[in-house]
């Protein structure tokens, strides 16, 4: 699902970058669609090291950030590894679904470029935009799943990686990387990822193994339950009549997403229960509580692509 976003290079090791931590992970295949940690480490970041942003400088303390990456790679036993995938903080990139009228006037590439500028709020010349065509809407309009990173922001990360001798072949925002755990053939019907962050959450609905709806919600931790309920109401209004592919499972990652609250919201909004997936349900195997799936889901998902 993710190969359209960047160059088709799939390392077996990945870095996970967040505001408060850096992680390094390598996985090994353990069955057809199951992966175990081969090596992993999570290193906390001081608040003055990284300030993820779509438009502004991200890396505030270059030496501190470099040291944390090196420590994570060393702790995971991966210091000599050169080829990596990387998941970036959700605030550093933006994703959206772009819709284009079929048969309209004008060059389709120019229309998509204009749509991206409107959606992401910056001129196309300042953005790295990667996109993939996804299933059309019922009215036949073409749709594209797009991810954008400001060139000045991605240059910060890539320049540091290059200085460290790291070749980053696949770079994705955290929520997009996390959807890899919902893209397997065993995930029939609709699946929902809810990935929380400091200022809210990102929700991605997958239909037929590809993104269909994306919502980025800004809210306080106390408002998450209400916003998730509204999200499920939206799903029910838009897709509720399509019984064959009805939403039946959700993968909730991050703080503030209580499973019991998700179940209660589903029963009220949808009139039925949802299966809240565990790490084992999606094929992630680890018994080390010091390596939580909430932190490793994005980089481990990218690392699993190296076994495809």
Image (cartoon, grey):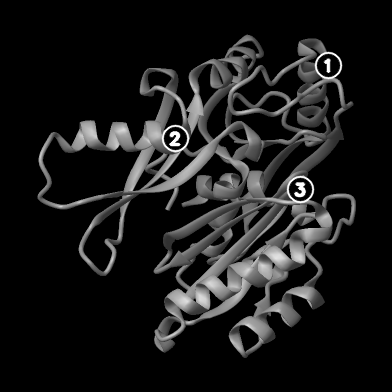
- The quadrant in which residue 241 appears is bottom left
Q: Of the residues tagged 2 and 1, which is closer to the observer?
A: 1
Of 275 and 108, nearer the camera is: 108
Residue at x 82%, y 39% (from the top left corner): 42
Residue drawn at x 39%, y 69% is 208
Residue 211 position within the rendered picture, expressed as x and y whole percent measured from the top left? 44, 58
Residue behind mark 2: 9
Q: Position of residue 238 (x, y in %)?
A: 44, 74
Q: Earlier in the sequence, mark 2 or mark 3?
A: 2
Within 10 Å of the Cα at label 2, are there few (<14), some (14-19), or many (20+) other Cα atoms?
some
Residue 247 in percent (x, y) is at 53, 78
Residue shown at 87%/27% (left/top)? 47
For the question of whether residue 8 can be seen, the reply is no
Q: Nearer the viewer, mark 2 or mark 3?
A: 3
Q: Residue at position x 42%, y 34% from top? A: 6
Q: Are marks 2 and 1 in contact (CB under 8 Å)?
A: no
How crowded is the residue under tag 3: few (<14 C-alpha within 10 Å), some, or many (20+)?
some
Foreground: 249 or 112? Answer: 112
Asked if residue 306 lies left or right of residue 226, the reply is left
Q: Marks 2 and 1, how far apart in space?
A: 28 Å
Q: Quadrant of residue 254?
A: bottom right
**216 or 63: nearer the viewer:** 216
> In the image, residue 258 lies at what x, y percent?
81, 68
Disc 2 element: loop
**Dot 1: few (<14), some (14–19), or many (≥20) neighbours within 10 Å?**
some
Q: Is residue 298 positioned above or below 44 on the image?
A: below
In this view, 45 is above or below 193: above
Return the mark for residue 295: 3
Q: Is residue 298 visible?
A: yes
């Amino acid at each position: 699902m993710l190969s359209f976003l960047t160059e088709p290079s799939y390392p077996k090791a990945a870095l996970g970058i967040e505001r408060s931590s850096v992680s390094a992970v390598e996985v090994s295949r353990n069955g057809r669609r199951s992966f175990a940690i081969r090596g992993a480490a999570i290193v906390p970041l001081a608040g003055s090291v990284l300030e993820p942003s779509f438009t502004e400088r991200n890396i505030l303390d270059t030496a501190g950030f470099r040291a944390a990456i090196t420590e994570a790679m060393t702790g995971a036993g991966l210091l000599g590894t050169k080829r990596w995938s990387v998941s970036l903080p959700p605030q550093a990139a933006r994703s959206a679904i772009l819709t284009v009228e079929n048969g309209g006037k004008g060059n389709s590439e120019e229309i998509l470029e204009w749509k991206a500028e409107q959606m992401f709020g910056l001129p196309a010349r300042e953005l790295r935009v990667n996109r993939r065509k996804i299933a059309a809407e019922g009215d036949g309009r073409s749709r594209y799943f797009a991810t954008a990173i400001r060139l000045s922001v991605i240059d910060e990360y890539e320049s540091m990686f290059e200085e460290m001798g790291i070749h980053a072949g696949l770079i994705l925002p955290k929520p997009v990387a996390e959807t890899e755990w919902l893209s397997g053939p065993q995930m029939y019907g609709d699946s929902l990822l809810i990935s929380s962050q400091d200022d809210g959450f990102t929700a991605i609905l997958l239909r037929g193994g590809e993104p269909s709806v994306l919502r980025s919600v800004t809210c306080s931790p106390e408002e998450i339950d209400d916003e998730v309920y509204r999200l499920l109401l939206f799903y029910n209004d838009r897709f509720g009549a399509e019984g064959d592919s009805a939403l039946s499972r959700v993968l909730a990652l991050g703080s503030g997403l209580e499973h019991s609250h998700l179940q209660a919201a589903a029963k009220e909004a949808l009139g039925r229960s949802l299966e809240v997936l565990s790490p084992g349900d999606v094929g992630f195997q680890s018994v080390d509580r010091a390596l939580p799936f909430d932190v490793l889901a994005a980089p481990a998902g990218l690392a699993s692509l190296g076994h495809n």
